[in-house]
Image: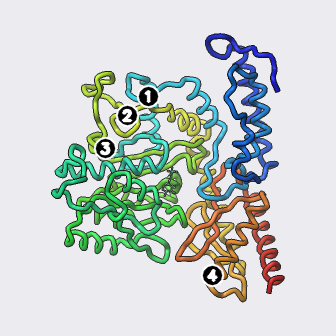
Amino acid sequence: MKTENKIPAFGDMPVDKFKENGYKMIDWIANYLSEIEKYPVLPQIKYGEIKNSIQKNPPLTGEMTENIFTDLDEVLMKGITHWNHPDFMAYFNSTSSGPGILAELLSAGLNINGMAWHTCPSATELEEAMIIWYRKIFNLPENFWGIVYDTASTSSFHAISAAREQLSHLKIREKGMAGRNDVPRLRIYTSQESHFSIDKSVVALGFGLESIKKIPVDNKFRMISGKLKEAIEDDKKNGWLPCCVVATVGTTSSTSVDPVDEIGTICKNENVWLHVDAAYAGTASILPEMQWIFKGIEKADSLVINPHKWMFTPIDYSLLFTMKPEVLKRAFNLSSEYLDTSKDKLTNFMDYGIQLGRRFRSLKPWFIIRYFGVEGLQKRIREHIRLAKLFAGWIEDNREFELISPVEFGVVCFRAVPEKINSQEALDAFNKNLLERINQTGKLFLSHTKLDGKYVIRICISGLRTQEEHVKKAWNLITDCYQETIKKIRRFN
Ligand SMILES: *Cc1c(COP(=O)(O)O)cnc(C)c1O
């Protein structure tokens, strides 16, 4: 549809047009969120459908915004996976919230670049203030300094960079690692259940994948600290230099919690950097009854928590805390003439990482924490844990299903174990089939994982809009799909 072009020859969209479209956009988002349950959680489309519906050439002259709104409804909405949907219970579901959306809008409106303090004092100082709020909310030690990055993958990359820099006698920052015979192989230890972002960091930092030692886990999927100790001792005998241990609080598959306290003692004795990856589960420490997850955290050198996973923060927002900001700074600080911050006695976040430009991300927690209040956030997170345990109870009461891992947070790992299906392969195939059937309904989105070699279905309750009725509905759907899968098998036998 072509309409008369009223775009001005120079300058921005006129103020009255901006207001008109802005109100329309807010209405659009408000309607979307209030009617979200009418959409299937997963889009029912094939690869290429969306791309092929987008005009092939960029418009030479400006188009009316009405056209853009129309295409939003008619083209893009067909390919949206509804992460805000109360029936989205896959992965670590991250949902947005009204205050978070408003903060994102304001961030684009102000469009500051917080690379250094003087390029936007409010951005740097709000970020510092929010770090202190989070530290209090999560009851973390006061000597944790913090910085915000986009994702946990990036936060962990920076933590492991600092761990490498801590081995300052190797002068890796200046000389690199390649072509030198005065640098031993460096070792990174993490559990078999840790997130692959750690492996990626190790690749990017030039350690090589061989340098990761995956420590075995116990029957609750927690790193066995005795095995870590053995591995470190073995390595030292064989010429490896231990560099960093990554413990996970809330592993991605089963949300198991590594014993940070015991691991921390080993790291202190060996003088090895301890990084704790609590990307998802760290948020739970907002609850007094969940603070056990961070027992021994004062022994950690760094810690990552993602408010964009379970704190109703629109993606992205990842917090990296460290006891040793000076080491992180040593790893990344470079001055340039045009942005010379070398004599500043204040925080310039550009000195603590890869990125120079910085978004005004901390507007998000400033809106979200103020709007809900700490108690409001606590209630919501406590409710998610309650719902997960309720769901786990239904699994335990049903002989055709089994729980695969303990439920501490909002995640339940389970599988169907129909009578007469005994082999591991047949059970895996059955559960895979069951999950496909569930997701094809469009009424619920669950994901899967492998635990102990078993194909396991995984439900995550962390959506802001997910309530008990949704969890009940999910369980009914799962059992219905189970019956259908059983019937289908009978037909083939
Ligand atoms: C989700 C997750 C990550 C990766 O998070 P991103 O922010 O997407 O990079 C890392 N570690 C753990 C334990 C996670 O659950």
Mark closest to the chain's N terminus, 1 or 4: 1
- Residue 425 in the image: state x and y as whole percent: 62, 81
Q: Residue visible at 31% across and 43% down?
A: 328
Q: Quadrant of the N terminus?
A: top right
Q: Which mark is residue 328?
A: 3
Secondary structure of the residue carrying tag 1 is loop
Disc 1 marks which amino acid? Gly
Q: Can residue 469 be seen at all in this image of the molecule?
A: no
Secondary structure of the residue carrying tag 3 is helix
> Which color scheme does this rendered protein use?
rainbow
Disc number lying in front (4 or 3):
4
- Residue 451 in the image: state x and y as whole percent: 54, 73
Mark closest to the chain's N terminus, 3 or 2: 3
Mark closest to the chain's N terminus, 4 or 3: 3
Identify which residue, 323 or 74, lies in the foreground: 74
On the rendered structure, is 187 left or right of 56?
left
Write down the residue under mark 4: 425
**Are circles 1 and 3 on residues that touch, CB within 8 Å?**
no
- Cα separation between marks 2 and 4: 51 Å
- Cα separation between marks 4 and 3: 47 Å
Mark closest to the chain's N terminus, 1 or 3: 1
- Cα separation between marks 3 and 2: 11 Å
Write down the residue under mark 2: 349
- Residue 208 in the image: state x and y as whole percent: 34, 59
Label 3 CB sits under 8 Å from any ligand 1 atom: no
Q: Is the residue marked by circle 4 packed among few (<14), some (14-19), or many (20+) residues within 10 Å?
A: few
Q: Can residue 20 be seen at all in this image of the molecule?
A: yes
Disc 3 marks which amino acid? Leu
Write down the residue under mark 1: 114
